[in-house]
Image (cartoon, rainbow, N blue to C red):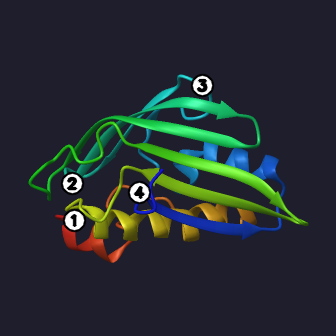
Amino acid sequence: MSAQDFTTTLLVDQSPEIVFKAIQNVRGWWSEEIEGNTANLNDEFNYHYEEVHRCKIKLIEVIQNQKIVWLIEENYFSFTKDDTEWTNTKAVFEISKKDTKTELTFTHIGLVPEYECYEVCKSGWTNYIQNSLKKLITTGKGEPNASGKPQTAAERKLSKK
């Protein structure tokens, strides 16, 4: 990890077990249109948002109630010169106890300010982690994107709908 990799942290009252299960429920906080399995080691899934963003992700590390690591094996962006900017980057979810609370640190290793997609991706991840995933953890209901429903200003700008 470098100091430039995108990272965001949240603190919740729920247990590490609840946080872990929420992360595994990718359809519940990122996108309802996920295809594939999202919970166990070596699971693979596909994400797509309209014709703007598509990626294929593999779970390469899963430590119960502590850590999940995704490898972005393939990626396509319609809005960048290099449409593969996320390819071979990693999304890391680290869970730890902090006194009576649970801390989740999300780091997208390889998502750095030099990337053309950085501001859009930073906005997206901030929304999906700090808003949608946090709501899924704390209330049982997240705010994933659904067909035709962009969640962030950047998604609305890039959306054809």
**Could you tell which of marks 4 and 3 lies nearer the N-terminus?**
3
Q: Which residue is mark 2?
A: 52
Residue at 62% in and 28% down: 40
Query: Amino acid under label 4?
Result: Ala
Instruction: Please name whichever residue, 44 or 3, is drawn nearer the observer in this view of the structure.
Output: 3
According to the image, label 3 marks what residue? 41
Please rate how many residues cluster around mark 1, counting C-alpha atoms within 10 Å: few if below 14, some from 14 to 19, many from 20. Answer: some
Callout 1 secondary element: loop
Q: Position of residue 53 (x, y in %)?
A: 26, 50
Q: Is residue 13 left or right of residue 125?
A: right
Q: Position of residue 98 (x, y in %)?
A: 83, 64
According to the picture, the residue beneath numbered tag 4 turns out to be 146
Residue at disc 3, secondary structure: loop
Q: Tell me the CA gap for discs 1 and 3.
A: 33 Å
What's the residue type where badge 3 is placed?
Answer: Leu
Q: What's the CA distance linking mark 4 and mark 3?
A: 26 Å
Mark seen at residue 159: 1
The picture quadrant where one finds residue 132 is bottom right
Find residue 136 and report its horizontal and vertical position in percent: 66, 60
